[in-house]
Amino acid sequence: GESVGLHLPTLSVQEGDNSIINCAYSNSASDYFIWYKQESGKGPQFIIDIRSNMDKRQGQRVTVLLNKTVKHLSLQIAATQPGDSAVYFCAENIVDQGGKLIFGQGTELSVKP
Amino acid sequence: NAGVMQNPRHLVRRRGQEARLRCSPMKGHSHVYWYRQLPEEGLKFMVYLQKENIIDESGMPKERFSAEFPKEGPSILRIQQVVRGDSAAYFCASSPPRTGGDEQYFGPGTRLTVT
C-alpha cells in the first residue's frame, strides 16, 4: 500500500507488505528531519533521522528518503508487522535556529494480520 | 539510562486552578523542549529551555503559561487559571548539549483534563 501524503491520514496494509508513508514539509530552509512513531497513549518514539546533505538513509527495516526539490520526505517500512501499527509523524528542524521541531499532521498506519 | 520522565501522567484540574507539569530530562541532556498535542493532531512546539535559560518561547501562549528549567531539579511547565481549551497532552523532550540537529527523546506525556 502507499500513502498519498497528508491528504490521506490513514494507511492500511497487510502484514508482510511494505509501507510507504509520505510527508510534505513546510520550510525550504529546514535541514534536519526526523520520523517519529507514536502509539496510543504514549510519547513519540524516534525511528530514524536524516540531514539535508543526504537523500537516503537506512535503518533496521526502515528507510527515509528526502527530496529537497519538492520538499518531500518518505518513510518506508519493510515487511510491516502488527507492532508497526501507530501514528507516524515527520518533523523538521532548522539547525541554526535551535532545536525547535515542526511536526507534520501524522499518518495512522494500520497493519492487518 | 532512564529515559525522559514526566509527572504526573494524568492531571485533572477545574477551571481556574493551576496546573504544574514536571519533566526530568535524560541523563546528560541539558536541553528541554515542551510540546502540546491536541487530540488527533501533531505536536506543537511551545518552549525550548536550557538550564536557567529560556532559549525560544515562540510557541508559548502570551498569558497564563510559563516554563522554567532550574539549575537543580526538573523542568516545570506551569499553566495558571486553566481553561477547558488547555486540555491536551503535554510532552517534554530532551536532547544532548548541542543546539539543534539532534534527535529529541520524548517522555510519556502528561494528559491534562480541565473540567
Image: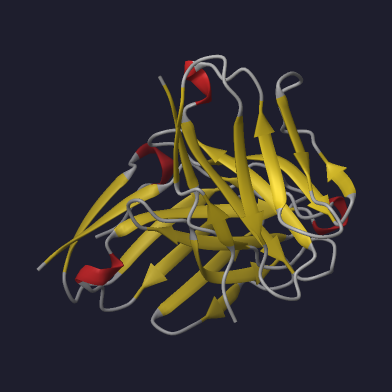
Give the number of callouts: 0
Q: Nearer the viewer, residue A53 or A93?
A: A93
On-image quarter of the N terminus of chain B: bottom right
Q: Position of residue B66 (x, y in %)?
A: 75, 32
Who's the residue at 52% across and 62% down the image? A35
- In this rendering, would B77 be left or right of A61? right
Lateral position of residue A79 relative to residue B69, left or right: left
Q: Position of residue A51 (x, y in %)?
A: 70, 69
Q: Nearer the viewer, residue B15 or B104?
A: B15
Left-right relation of B97 to A28: right
Where residue A34 sits, quadrant-wise, is bottom right
Residue B71: % across, % down: 87, 58
Residue A93, picture quadrant: bottom right
Toward the left, the furthest residue is A113
Q: Is residue A69 visible?
A: no
Residue at (47%, 27%) from the top-left corner?
Answer: B87
- On the image, the x and y values in percent for residue B112 come to 47, 34
Q: Is residue B30 visible?
A: yes
Vertical relation: B46 (above or below) A68: above
Colour treatment of the image: secondary structure
Q: Residue at x 34, y 42 (%)?
A: A9
**Is B78 in front, or is B42?**
B78
Identified at 72% across, 68% down, the residue is B102
Quadrant location of the C terminus of chain B in the rendered image: top left
Q: Is residue B45 left or right of residue B110?
A: right
